[in-house]
Amino acid sequence: MKNYTRLLKYILPYKRRLFEAIVCIIIAAGANLYLPWIIKDMIDKVLAEKDMLMLNVIAAGIVITFLIRGIFYYGQSYLVSFVGERVIIDVREILFKKFQRLPLSYFDRHQTGEIMSYITNDVAALQNALVDRLIELVTESSIFVGSLVMMFLLDWQLSLLTLITVPLVGEAMKIFGRKMKSSGAVIQERLADITALMQESISAVRVVKSFVREDFEIQRFTRENDLNFRAQMKSVQIQSLLTPTVEFLAALAVTVIVWFGGYEVVNGNITAGALVAFLTYAVNLANPVKRISRVYGTIQKAMAGAERVFGIMDMPEAIADKPEAKAMPAVKGYVEFDDVTFGYKDDIPALEHISFKAEPGQMIAFVGPSGAGKSTIANLIPRFYDVNGGAIRIDGQDVRDVTMSSLREQIGIVPQETMLFSTTVRENIRYGRLDATDEELVQAAKDANAHEFIMQLPEGYDTKIGERGLNLSGGQRQRIAIARAILKNPQLLILDEATSALDTESEKIVQAALDRLMVGRTSFVIAHRLSTIFNADQIYVIEKGHIREHGTHEELLALGGLYSSLYNIQFSK
């Protein structure tokens, strides 16, 4: 019930249009209620009494009724669709904003396709419930109530007998509704699994083809698709049982009407026309009950999607600023890790008792085996995660005491796997500083050794580079990322294996751009190729979450420890 109430909160801003829509629905439904009364007058007055005036009135009434019905039907369709679409747009926008503010740990645990499923499949289920089904629900409810009123006007005793089956219908809908909601939850989960698999397989299409695993991926998809089919058929099975159950209970009511109504006509208590009209209203009563039961089942399935959507909305957001947090002033570049301990999971530490200092303008490098904790250190500086113990200070201020935006605005990151947007080169570089002029943008590209190749593209800076920049080479993508970082002009710089995926020629060009970028900035470099950090002011060797040794390149070689071993492995030739 709370999900229904919560959905109403999103409808309230459009309550005027919703009220107008309900008025249109009621009037359009009311026009249908006049038709059985026409049948009554046709039998009792026109056919029995040969009343030509009544015949003319009936003919005019039919035309006017259908004209009114058509006008208000248009009104109901437009207004309900307007409200429903606006609500869905609002929910989708709120959901997208929520995903933007969720912590990185959420994205570490969930696939991209699964996340997309919330905005597509789950919101689409709400759209179906709010637009199409809302019209049907209000229309059939209006016909149900109106038919009931007309039946009481014709014969209150017969109407009371008819209502005996209403509690039975209500209980049946309640039982089946719970089953439909549970079934709907399974369907939404299966759709999320399919979306995740499709996104993953299509994103990795080069890997799939290089290993000739097309048939394997087809089999994976077929399995998930079959599970979705079974979930859908389970839902259909429940829905198919609900409708005949309600129809059977409605048939009992009609049977009572036929027998008792016939008895009343024989005894002269009501006219034949009144009985026919009553039976027509009774059918009008039964059909809405049947259709409402079907709509109710669909809405229950949609509520499963609503629960998933609201579950995301209720999740705690990313690390929040303290109420007393202040904006960080312009950073000078002093950085200190003071006995830092951190773990992605509480019982498994990724870093333990890490301590080091960086002076303004220094280049600090981190090396070590894969999984040692190098990237974790880089993730803690911009506060993508909060430390479990110890503190990180920039210019003497604990990063937890300043606002997140003021901290991250002064940090530039160039990752190993460059993520570009499927828009133009110009817009990708300007992402570093949205208010940058074209002159500043071009200068940043020149400093990143990117201007020359950009000008050779079909439309220069206005060339669209495709999804994730796949129309460019790895070196070109990396240089655009560096231009983006230069345009941001941060005082702190994080380079996470920025050249490890490049060939030798591209590495030289990119490294030259990085060297230019690091001038005057405090830089933290995670290195795979040791040749890129020979000039580092301090090199920290990380192993199993601990600092094993540190010093300059020459000092570490002389030490003959882990760094020396890594150096010998890379340069043994």
Image (tube, rainbow, N blue to C red):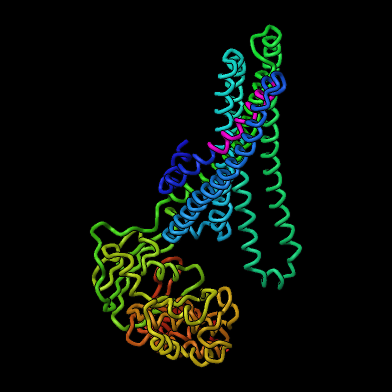
Please say whether residue 475 is visible from this viewpoint: yes
Counting labels gives 0
Q: Is residue 38 magenta?
A: yes
Work out whether 283 lies above or below 13. Answer: above
- Residue visible at 54% across and 37% down? 27
- Residue visible at 49% across and 49% down? 83
Give percent across and percent down for residue 539.
39, 79
Give percent across and percent down for residue 154.
59, 18
Q: Is residue 28 left or right of residue 559?
A: right
Q: Is residue 170 magenta?
A: no
Work out whether 50 lies above or below 108. Answer: above
Q: Nearer the viewer, residue 506 or 163?
A: 163
Please say whether residue 554 is visible from this viewpoint: no
Q: Nearer the viewer, residue 326 or 92?
A: 92
- As drawn, which residue projects farthest toward the right? 215
Give percent across and percent down for residue 42.
68, 25
- Residue visible at 70% across and 36% down? 237
Q: Is residue 235 left or right of residue 508?
A: right
- For residue 429, what is the image quadrant? bottom left
Q: Which contiguous range is marked in magenta?
A: 27-43
